[in-house]
C-alpha cells in the first residue's frame, strides 16, 4: 500500500473508532480495526506523527491517537517506489537463497553419485572375492 492510501486508512480508522467509543482510540484498537500488527501500526503512526498528520499522546499504559493536520496527507506520494529498501533487500535475499539452494542441490547430487560409485566398487570387490572363494573351495 502506498503512503497516501495508508495515511488515509489510518486517519479514517481513528475517526471511526473515536466516533464509536467517544474517546481517542489506542494503538491496539486501531491496529485491530484495520487488521495490521501492532508493531507495523505503531511504526506507521510514528511516521504520520512526525509529519503532523496524526497526534500521539502517551500515558504509562497506552498510546492514544488523534488527528492532526489531515490535509498534509495530500503531500504524500501516491505511488510506491520501486526501489523501496525493504522490498529490494527481500529480493536480494531471495536471489541469494535460490543460489544457495542450487548449490545445495548440486552438492547433494554429487554426494549421491559418489555413494553410488563407492557402492558399485564395493559390490564389484565382493563379487570377485565370492568367485575366488567358489574357485578355491
Image (spheres, grey):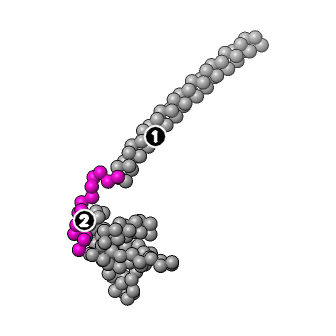
Q: Nearer the viewer, mark 1 or mark 2?
A: 2
- Residue plotted at (34% across, 49% down): 88
Q: Does residue 59 belong to the magenta stretch?
A: no
Q: Secondary structure at mark 2?
A: loop
Locate residue 126 relative to residue 5 in the image: left or right: right
Locate residue 30 relative to residue 136 in the image: left or right: left
- How many marks are shown on the rendered structure? 2
Note whether residue 29 is visible: no
Query: What residue does disc 2 label?
Result: 76
Name the main secondary structure of what is drawn in magenta: loop
Image vertical order of residue 21 relative to residue 131, above or below: below
- Residue plotted at (41% across, 73% down): 31
- Residue plotted at (60% across, 24% down): 118
Q: Residues within 10 Å of mark 1 (few under 14, many from 20)?
A: few
Q: Does residue 74 belong to the magenta stretch?
A: yes
- Label whose residue precedes the other's in the sequence (1 or 2): 2
Image vertical order of residue 91 relative to residue 100, above or below: below
Give the extent of the magenta segment: 71-85
Q: Position of residue 119 (x, y in %)?
A: 61, 26
Q: Residues within 10 Å of mark 2 (few under 14, many from 20)?
A: some
Q: Position of residue 27 (x, y in %)?
A: 42, 75
Query: What residue does disc 1 label?
Result: 101
Q: Quadrant of the N terminus?
A: bottom left
Q: Residue furthest bottom?
A: 22
Q: Position of residue 74 (x, y in %)?
A: 22, 69
Q: Position of residue 60 (x, y in %)?
A: 51, 78
Place residue 123 in its image quadrant: top right
Amino acid at each position: 500500500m502506498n503512503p497516501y492510501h495508508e495515511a488515509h486508512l489510518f486517519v479514517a480508522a481513528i475517526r471511526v473508532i473515536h466516533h464509536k467509543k467517544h474517546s481517542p482510540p489506542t494503538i491496539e484498537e486501531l491496529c485491530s480495526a484495520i487488521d495490521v500488527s501492532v508493531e507495523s501500526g505503531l511504526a506507521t503512526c510514528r511516521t504520520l506523527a512526525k509529519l503532523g498528520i496524526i497526534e500521539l499522546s502517551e500515558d504509562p499504559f497506552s498510546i492514544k491517537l488523534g488527528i492532526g493536520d489531515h490535509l498534509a496527507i495530500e503531500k504524500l506520494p501516491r505511488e510506491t517506489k520501486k526501489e523501496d529498501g525493504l522490498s529490494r533487500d527481500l529480493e536480494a535475499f531471495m536471489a541469494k537463497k535460490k543460489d544457495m539452494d542450487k548449490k545445495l542441490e548440486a552438492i547433494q547430487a554429487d554426494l549421491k553419485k559418489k555413494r553410488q560409485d563407492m557402492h558399485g566398487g564395493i559390490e564389484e570387490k565382493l563379487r570377485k572375492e565370492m568367485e575366488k572363494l567358489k574357485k578355491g573351495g
